[in-house]
Image: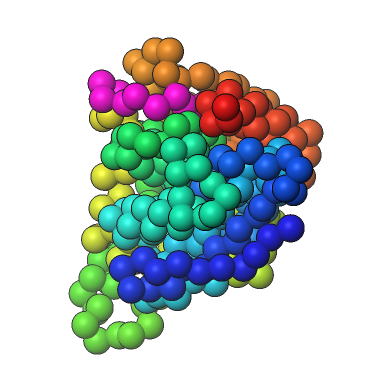
Amino acid sequence: MFKEISFKSHGTNCHARLYEPKRANGNSAGVVLAHGLSGTIDAGLIAYAEGFAKAGFHALVFDYRGFGLSDGTPRQFVSVPQQRQDWRQAIMTLRGHANVDEHRIGLWGMSFSGGHVIHMAHADPKIRAVVSQVPMIDPVLAINVGNYERGVEKTEAIRSHVLRWLKRRWFSNAPEMIMAARCRDGDVAVLASKEAAAYAKIGGPSWRNEVHPGTFISGKILDNNPSLLTDDLTVPMLLQMGEKDRLVSNEAIVNFARRCGPLATLSTYDAAHFTMLQNNAVQKQAIKEAIGFYHEHLTL
């Protein structure tokens, strides 16, 4: 049902999977998917790509450079400019498919990539629809949420870790990584709430529960801020919000939807941040809703 492929992004091979619909139900539209902070294809995205392909869409899901099965160094380094380059190349790859109409492309992202997809649609007027699941709409508020969940002592431990790397980076080829998602009480991690432990359970063989410390120095995390784009957006968006989410600011999501007016459809779920990536009834409903949204905006 899928092909393992790769594409070049700034000279680096990015690994991807292309899920193709059966010829009888294909609709010539396509969806590009990628994960959030430190995420990989095998950390909950396969069910979405499979679901979209079964519904008639070509679905291309990819790993950012430096993550999963993609090439690139440094590993586990989250760079907003680099990931946006990867998104552009992934979109171009799907547009170049012989059975895909380049004018009927949608995007799907969650959490950190839920911000990326809105930025990508803002920059590319040919994008026809966006599904943004539990999105990080305002990075400043998301950082504040993380600091609150983590507490002062653990937040300071992460800051000290980053500063140590900054001082020693010229003398070490193997930086000490920062844990991405807490697994148990006492862990010092970027994603600090108790629900973050679900990330490790979702992650497949290529996923690593770590983030390069340089992410917080030169990754330009604050540039992934869709809350600044509301006056200029033109793309229809489906925002899937988890009512129990303690990793992003739901207040920012609600405010963003209100400011975007009819462009944004806000759908709420009885879910935490990673609930919709797990094999459950909530995930099935989220996939079904996304398919309906794409059919409305991408199919003729």
Would you place residue 177 above or below residue 55 in this image? below
Please indicate whether residue 237 sits to the left or right of residue 28 in the image: left
Per the rendered image, the range of residues in magenta is: 230-244
Q: Main secondary structure of the magenta part?
A: loop
Apparent side of residue 102 relative to residue 206 in the rendered image (left or right): left
Residue closer to the observer: 43 or 86: 86
Which residue is rendered at x = 37% and y = 18% of the image? Answer: 260
Task: Give the percent coordinates (x, y) of residue 278.
Answer: 71, 45
How far across and down, in percent of the image, does residue 52 sit? 66, 42
**Between 219 and 157, which is closer to the camera in this rendering?**
219
Would you say residue 237 sits in the magenta stretch? yes
The image quadrant that residue 85 belongs to is: bottom left
Which residue is located at x 37 percent, y 36 percent? 126
Q: Residue 200 is drawn in which quadrant?
A: bottom right
In the image, 158 versus 278, the foreground residue is: 278
Question: Measured from the top left, where is residue 36 in percent x and y?
Answer: 49, 50
Q: Split into 4 quadrants, where in the image is the C terminus? A: top right
- Please tell me which residue is depicted at 45% across the width and 20% down the height of the picture: 264
Residue 60 visible in the current orientation:
yes
Q: Quadrant of the N terminus?
A: bottom right
> Is residue 81 highlighted in magenta?
no
Q: 183 left or right of 47?
A: left
